Amino acid sequence: MKILINTPDLSKHNGGVANHYIGLQPYWTQKVKYNFVGGRNGVPGPIILVFDYIKFFFLCLFGNYDVVLLNPSLGKTALKRDALFLKISKWFKIKTVVFFHGWNQAIAAEIDDNPKQFQKQFQKADTFIILASSFKNRLLSWGISSPIYMSTTKINDELLDRFNIDNKPFDKSLLFLARIEKNKGVFTTLNAFKVVLRVFPDAQLQIAGYGTALEKAKEYAHKQNIKNVSFLGSIKGNTLVNKFVHSSIYILPTTHGEGMPTSVLEAMAFGLPIISRPVGGLVDFFEEDKMGYLIESLDPKVYAEKIIQLLENPEKIKEIGKYNHEYAKRNFIASKVALRLEQIITSEL
């Protein structure tokens, strides 16, 4: 079976959709071709879009593909772009699967008010894939009648190659790993940690990532005299692994429209209890108190209480950590995600 997957240029992207398909690439059992769309080689996406449509047309015409997989986010630009890709592939009578990764709640609210345009653009898709049951319910409310499946983001298998949960040091080290933006919860994290330091003055907080709020976050930590905070910048490879291994609690009080935050899955794989919010696909599998805590509130004191509760009970941290590690290995490593995704893509043929 031949599958054509539209994806951003894998050589120029290290996050989002591109990162997802980089991780899955070694594990396909079917014949899969990646078709790069969007900005690349220094050319912005809108300029190269006409070329992308022409190339896609000829791939559908001559490629003998059984399935096309489109990978938009729920955003205005992506919806308009991929609606035409869908129209082309269905004109050639190729089964077409639409996998929504990002999910913009503001755009979803607009579609709620007038779903006819969305239905008109995407009703021809044979199958949909989403990252959260709440997204599925939204598609159903918009009149989508095609099968809708749930998938997940993934953890690269090789990240865990040399990791042994039994050798993990559990201490008082917290990790925030995400884009440094206000809506990702970096300031909530800092304020929560300030409260934690009153009880555990030797606790450590490491903040990893870049973003528009990075300098403001550094300045805020300094002005508020929040001790024991390290800003690591963007980390990957061995440095990323090392930080996961030597951290004991992962915190992400995000208000962003998350699908399935990869950093949460990675943190689970490395045995960290999770303290986050009930966003996206997390609510579909998360076991409260057994995996950590999903907190609806945005009050830093509420997050501080849960952190302190864990730090006062190191055995609880270990218990949750081991459970999360085993759960992540069973459900989120790339080799297993690729096989499940293939099963969805090739179903009903």
Image: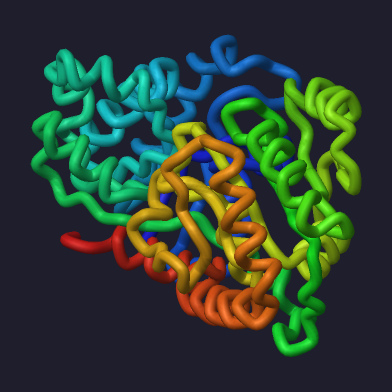
Q: Residue at x 37, y 64 (%)?
A: 285
* Viewer-closest of 184 and 22: 184
Quadrant placement of the N terminus: bottom left
The mark tally for this picture is: 0
Q: Residue at x 23, y 63 (%)?
A: 347
Q: Is residue 257 left or right of residue 134?
A: right
**Residue 40 spot, x, y in % from top left:** 68, 26
- Write down the quadrant of residue 24 in the picture: bottom right
> Residue most toward the front?
198
Q: Is residue 97 left or right of residue 275?
A: left
Q: Residue at x 70, y 36 (%)?
A: 191
**Residue 113 spot, x, y in % from top left:** 17, 15
> Residue most toward the bottom?
166
Quadrant placement of the C terminus: bottom left
**Residue 19 spot, x, y in % from top left:** 62, 48
Q: Residue at x 53, y 80 (%)?
A: 323
- Write down the quadrant of residue 112 in the picture: top left
Looking at the image, is 138 positioned above or below residue 128?
above
* Viewer-closest of 285 and 194: 194
Looking at the image, is 254 positioned above or below residue 164?
above
Q: Is residue 313 left or right of residue 81?
A: right
* Viewer-closest of 315 and 110: 315
- Write down the quadrant of residue 272 in the picture: bottom right
**Residue 114 spot, x, y in % from top left:** 15, 14
Residue 21 seen in this snapshot = no
